[in-house]
Image (cartoon, coloured by chain):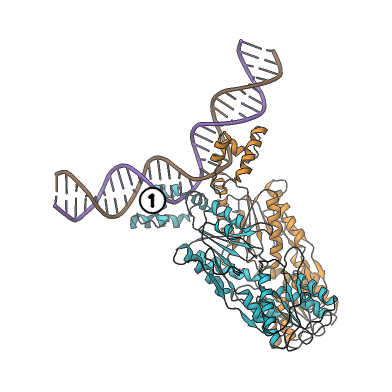
Chain colours: A orange, B cyan, C purple, D brown
Amino acid sequence: MSGYTIKDIAKECGVGVSTVSRALNNHPDINKETKKRIMEVVEARKFSPSTTARDLKRIRSNTIAVLVKGLDNPLFHKMMDIFQLEIESKKYDFVFQRVGAKDDEISVALDMIKERKLKGIIFLGGNFTHSEEQLETISVPFVLATISPGKNVNTDIYSSVSVDDVKESYKITDYLCSIGHKRIAILLPDNGDESVGSLRLEGYKQALSKHGITVEEQLIRYSVDEGDSFSMENGYKLMRQLLSEDIYFTGVFAASDKIAVGAMKALLEAGKKIPEDVSVCGFDGLDIARYYHPTITTIVQPIDDMAGRVITQLFSLIEETEANSQITFEGKLLVGESTGPV
Amino acid sequence: MSGYTIKDIAKECGVGVSTVSRALNNHPDINKETKKRIMEVVEARKFSPSTTARDLKRIRSNTIAVLVKGLDNPLFHKMMDIFQLEIESKKYDFVFQRVGAKDDEISVALDMIKERKLKGIIFLGGNFTHSEEQLETISVPFVLATISPGKNVNTDIYSSVSVDDVKESYKITDYLCSIGHKRIAILLPDNGDESVGSLRLEGYKQALSKHGITVEEQLIRYSVDEGDSFSMENGYKLMRQLLSEDIYFTGVFAASDKIAVGAMKALLEAGKKIPEDVSVCGFDGLDIARYYHPTITTIVQPIDDMAGRVITQLFSLIEETEANSQITFEGKLLVGESTGPV
DNA sequence: AACGGTACCGAAAACGTTTCCAAGAACGTG
DNA sequence: CACGTTCTTGGAAACGTTTTCGGTACCGTT
């Protein structure tokens, strides 16, 4: 089925191995004719050079890696599709690496850079709470996808593409307030200081304060479970707990659609009507938001555009035509059946 | 941060490179003492050998690849977690490869075997409609995960771990019949002859025939869309179409939970009550089945067990302690709120 | 005719490992 | 003491590429 090496091709064509290599790599120092002849043999034999040997020899490979921490977020799948498509269409190699829940993405990245001589990296998802010093150890261009810059905006040591989590959370909380809600619970994945959760909390607080509503700690709920903190199960548990405490609220902002689903199930089970008794909204714009019953009011992240932008940004960095920057996209407030006037 | 090679370590220890290699690979031909000394330096320098060079040289690497076609199925994520954990705990290297929608998994596999000198492969999901000849070109042990053997059971040219799709579909359709449903629509992802859809259709037909119900073509619906045919959107469209045709039915068997969700949304939108007007069930046992409102009657696949079995089977094959076999697990009928007597 | 420049090409070194081979040391045995 | 065995080791070849370096052949100029 294979077993061909560049040497076999060279022999068959009656040329040296270096000439074959040149043909394969679009080197200028080669005669059009010989190149054509070689490529014909290459096609015929279905030869493809060993990337292993290639990576070993090359000072820099042609490989772009996507590192993702936990792929449970459906948003990531679509992005990955686009990444793979775009990268391969640009004749780069694409490699996908999961980083385990306990692993540190930077060390994984560093390992891969050394091993595969990466040309670029895309970090997808996760919280990515790393110091600038750590980021600076990454010696190749990289882009953080769907990861908000957080506090340290406008830094030139990395690039990121995401929605502005603070702003979008503000937007949706503001919407809840604008239709009359004053007591709004927020369901967060965790209480990490640098996490996306904290950004969404920030937006929530800003919206409340704009509407003159005081933030109440008892309405702020964090998942405590290990594992996937964005799960439906977490939303369910959080809401059950909230209901059991007999706290009054008319609105809920769940930091993700999956959390919202769990929370809604708990509410519906408890006999609450949505949105008559309680309004709920989520975040992300997953399919389930459109197909839950009732449909869920949410912030739709423009992932297709974002994915495309990640790619162009990464290639700009590689080709050094552009510097690092933090790019934010505008989310879209999609009003569903799960929210209504109080 | 890196840059160390085996040569540096050798120099620092005052030994030859081959000795370091022996230490690293648990070779017997090495003095306990020197090995210990070398390993200390290796630890101290955080040295790890280049897998690229390793793969290039070795006749067979230590790498096991998981190839998955489309990772939109949440079931796969949990399996992947287990795969990665188990494989790495066995000191094997783990590599994950997506195969694009249009790509052929066998060629991808063949490429990787050549490149990475794979020790084993796990094919996850997809339909995997390949001839025996094609399968025989795969020169390393491999296991099909969540892929039913289909027609050709009891073959010794490959291993698979899955539920028995025919049997489980029979089980859930039988349940619908047993509570009085006689007109049951089935919603399938595609009409491929070898696909998992066709197996689930087969189980459906068997159940109907056991109950003396004749199969009606108009109640059998296939997704026609490109892309993810297991999507909620497809379920939604299929049901809308069905409703528009004014065909009478009291039960629906959707070939996956996601299809079921879409279908239920369409029903609910149309003012149908579930399960009073129509009973719906799904397949897979996704989280959403437990958190939809109403909860969805479904077949729960025991994925943790299955994932574990995939690993043990693969290692049995690698160590040649066992031959190929098709292993099926029993699914569990989980009755939710979406089904009731007619 | 001599020369510089250009286009093309092959030999060989390198990338970082593993593994084969030979060889030295240590040891017991006859 | 000579000799085979067993451990342990280092040197060197090999894996399949890319890339540097130098060389040949040909061209147009002077």
Q: Nearer the viewer, residue B88 or A4?
A: A4
Residue receiving disc 1: B19
Quadrant position of residue A111: bottom right
Q: Nearer the viewer, residue A255 or A95?
A: A95
Residue B158 drawn above or below residue B275 = above
A258 to C20, vertically: above or below? below
Q: In screen coordinates, is B137 left or right of B283?
A: left
Mark 1, Cα crowd under 10 Å, few <14 / some 14-19 / many 20+, is many
Query: Which chain contains the residue that carries disc 1?
Result: B
Location of residue C21 in the rendering, given as x and y in whole percent from the top left corner: 35, 44
Please state if D11 lies on the left or on the right of D23 as rendered: left
Secondary structure, mark 1, is: helix
Q: Position of residue B191 (x, y in %)?
A: 72, 67
Q: Can residue A252 be seen in the rendering of this structure? A: yes
With respect to residue D7, does B234 lie above or below?
below
Which residue occupies 82% across, 70% down? Answer: A334
In this orientation, which residue lies closer to the viewer: B67 or B254?
Answer: B254
Which quarter of the image is occupied by the C terminus of chain A?
bottom right
The quadrant where residue B178 appears:
bottom right
